[in-house]
Image (tube, helix red, strand yellow):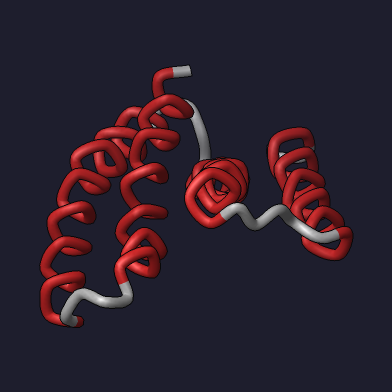
Amino acid sequence: MITALLLSLSNIFMTLAWYGHLKFKDKPLWLVIVVSWGLAFFEYLFQVPANRIGSARFTLAQLKVMQECITIVVFTIIVGLLFRQMPRWNNIISFLLIVAAVYFTFNFEK
């Protein structure tokens, strides 16, 4: 559970670093790059321990698929809140396919 929590926190910072600057298109590019790098620092503060702790229990493939699923959830929430953009039907299907990847990764690993 701690791995999923740390990955969730990491993804909040990652999503804000990658997409949050789009709310500030009037700001100079150099400034949003610096701010994004600052946010990425906090992403790594959570992501590195998450993978270090998680690798004791999960395979690397499981960690990656878990991270991708968490990324989609966090991305959807942040984009909905900050940009008022909701996923369309085709986005939802693609998200469900990622959830299916989680199922197959965790249930058929030996």
If the image is split into quadrants, where does the C terminus sit?
A: top right
Residue 68 in view here: no
Who is closer to the viewer here, 93 or 76?
76
**Residue 47 against residue 17 in the figure, above or below:** above
Q: Is residue 92 left or right of residue 84?
A: right
Q: Is residue 80 left or right of residue 42?
A: right
Who is closer to the viewer here, 78 or 28?
28
Where residue 54 sits in the image (x, y, percent)?
Answer: 41, 31
Residue at x 32%, y 46% (from the top left corner) = 13
User: Which image quadrant for residue 32?
Assistant: bottom left
**Residue 90 against residue 82 in the figure, above or below:** below
Where residue 23 sits in the image (x, y, percent)?
Answer: 38, 64
Where residue 101 sits in the image (x, y, percent)?
Answer: 75, 50
> Residue lying farthest top?
1
Residue 16 in view here: yes
Residue at x 74%, y 56% (from the top left corner) = 87
**Residue 19 against residue 103 in the figure, above or below:** below
Residue at x 36%, y 34% (from the top left corner) = 9
Where residue 107 sits in the image (x, y, percent)?
Answer: 77, 34
Residue at x 81%, y 60% (from the top left corner) = 88
Q: Is residue 44 left or right of residue 57?
A: left
> Residue lying farthest bottom?
29
How many numbered marks are there? 0
Who is closer to the viewer here, 31 or 93?
31
